[in-house]
Amino acid sequence: MYRKADLSPILEELDATDGLDGLQAVSAGLRDALSIDHIVYHWVDSAGDQYGCGTYPEDWIQRYIDKQYLRVDPVIVGCFQRFHPVDWKAVDWSGKAAREFLTDALDNGVGNQGYSIPVRGPSGQFALFTANHNCSDEEWSEFKEIYGHDLILIAHYFNRKALDFEENRAPQPVRALSPREVDALTFLALGYSRAQVAHSLSISEHTLRVYIESARFKLGALNTTHAIAKALSQGLIVM
């Protein structure tokens, strides 16, 4: 049975990170805090360059690149077509290439369970944040129930940091929104109800309404949907 860990030290470490190498250390720390096998973050920037950090074995990472598994990896394909988190068991593994890839991955230290969160940033930037483990379906279902919402937030925090470190990137506009306002709009953009957002952020629906109205005022938005659209277009939240 999973016991929910205090992830605030990880978020503080992530916030203090001042370079891409720091994301690697945060990945390992998060993996240990969650008591799972792997955490992986992979991004493609607006110029098409790729960067990855995480805890997969080095031999597997090189094998993945050498065999060009990016072309057949059903998780990549499934996440690129979606905005919501993807459980690996819900991905189509029926093709021969996909099955061979999965067998190779399991043989090289990748766990049989995965939960991948697609994140989209400005100018075509795309990233994938993945929690990976070897356990039963029942154990993994419990893990997702406990940490699913936290992983969505952390995925977006990772991506914000990576965008800050991207070379030759035009500076982002000054962030007019507070972190809580960003979190609230991000969850709403992902399709969560207000009750679900309030639960995820451990606040009351009244407090959530205050954050939403404050964000709407700052953005000059007519309603919540307009606020989300403006925040996305200005790069204040990323999906």
Image: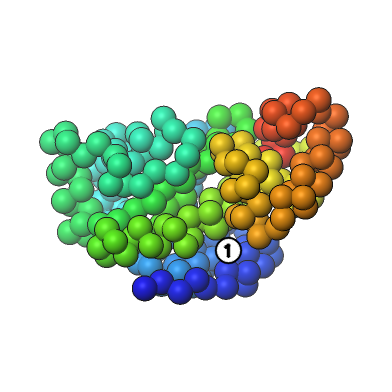
Give the image location of residue 158, x and y in percent: 58, 53
Q: Is residue 150 above or below residue 82?
A: below
- Up the image or down, 232 lies above or below 2; here it is above
The residue nearer to you, when weighing 64 against 232, is 232
- Tally of numbered discs: 1
Residue 126 falls left or right of residue 123 = left
Secondary structure of the residue carrying numbered label 1: helix
Residue type at tag 1: Gly
Looking at the image, is 172 positioned above or below residue 158?
Answer: above
Q: Name the residue at 17% across, 36% down.
A: 94
| Residue 37 can be seen, yes or no | yes
Image quarter where the C terminus lies is top right
User: Where is 176 relative to 9, above or below?
Assistant: above
| x 63%, y 69%: residue | 8
Residue 232 falls in which quadrant of the image? Answer: top right
Residue at screen point 42% across, 52% down: 130
* Residue toward you, 57 or 145: 145
Q: Taking 198 as reference, is 120 left or right?
A: left
Which residue position holds label 1?
22
Q: Residue at x 45, y 69 (%)?
A: 34
Residue 70 position within the rendered picture, expressed as x and y whole percent measured from the top left? 32, 39
